[in-house]
Amino acid sequence: MIILVLALLAAVIFLPQWWVKRVLARYRSPRDRYERSGARLARELLDRLGLEAVRVERAEPGQDHYDPEERAVRLSPEHYDFGSLTAVTVAAHEVGHAVQHADGYRPLLWRTRLVKSLQRLQRFGVILIALMPIAILALRLPSAGVALLVVGLASLASGIIVHLMTLPTEIDASFRRAMPLLVKGGYLRQEDRWHARRILTAAALTYVAASLMGLVNFWWWLRVLRP
């Protein structure tokens, strides 16, 4: 029974991440399916929408994102340089976030503020967990160590909540912004539309996968710190 439960837990945690990676990788070939590279398409969409001030930049591999502070769409090399179906679809998704920002889409603004705050809180949480043994030994107050542990773990768990709260913003960027831009602009072949929807679903679910991985990290800390 324990083995079955562990197997089911592993499937719930790792299958979404595996599926997201598989979908994105599947449609990266052929690289020249579309004449426009992801970077060129992003630039064209932004200019059409009156967002000339938003930059299009190359990111580290696997780090596609929109930076609202720098006002930049950042695409990983395989999406920046090439014209695969994944490249143009992911580029449109990130442009969708830029459109949200320009429209003052509240969930995106809330997420941006929350992420900044929680990044500091999570770093603080790791420090608190590290200080727990010192507090117990120096103060000889087990309750002080427990308090530090609780606060530290709560700060780590906050990242999971942020990822789950991000999902509506990602779905909006994918299906209310990116897909209409691609279809109405004639950027997608008719036979690619269903596949593009799969890619956009995968782009949105990256944060669900991140949340589940966060749960694993949280569970690991509990195991390590359990007496």
Image (cartoon, helix red, strand yellow):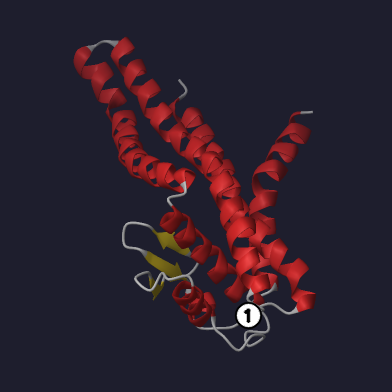
Q: Position of residue 46 (x, y in %)?
A: 46, 72
Q: Quadrant of residue 130?
A: top left
Residue 83 at least partly seen: yes
Q: Quadrant of the C terminus?
A: top left
At a point 34% along the width and 29% down the height, the residue shown is 129
Q: Amino acid at mark 1?
A: Ser
Q: Position of residue 64 (x, y in %)?
A: 48, 65
Location of residue 166 with respect to 128 vertically, above or below: below
Q: Residue at x 68, y 71 (%)?
A: 183
Residue 113 spot, x, y in % from top left: 36, 43
Which sits in the foreground, 65 or 78? 65
Residue 128, percent from left and from top: 30, 29
Taking 197 as reference, is 119 above or below it?
above
Q: Residue at x 65, y 65 (%)?
A: 179
Task: Please give left or right for residue 24 compared with residue 191 in the image.
Answer: left
> Is residue 206 something that shows in the picture?
no
Q: Nearer the viewer, residue 37 or 123?
A: 37
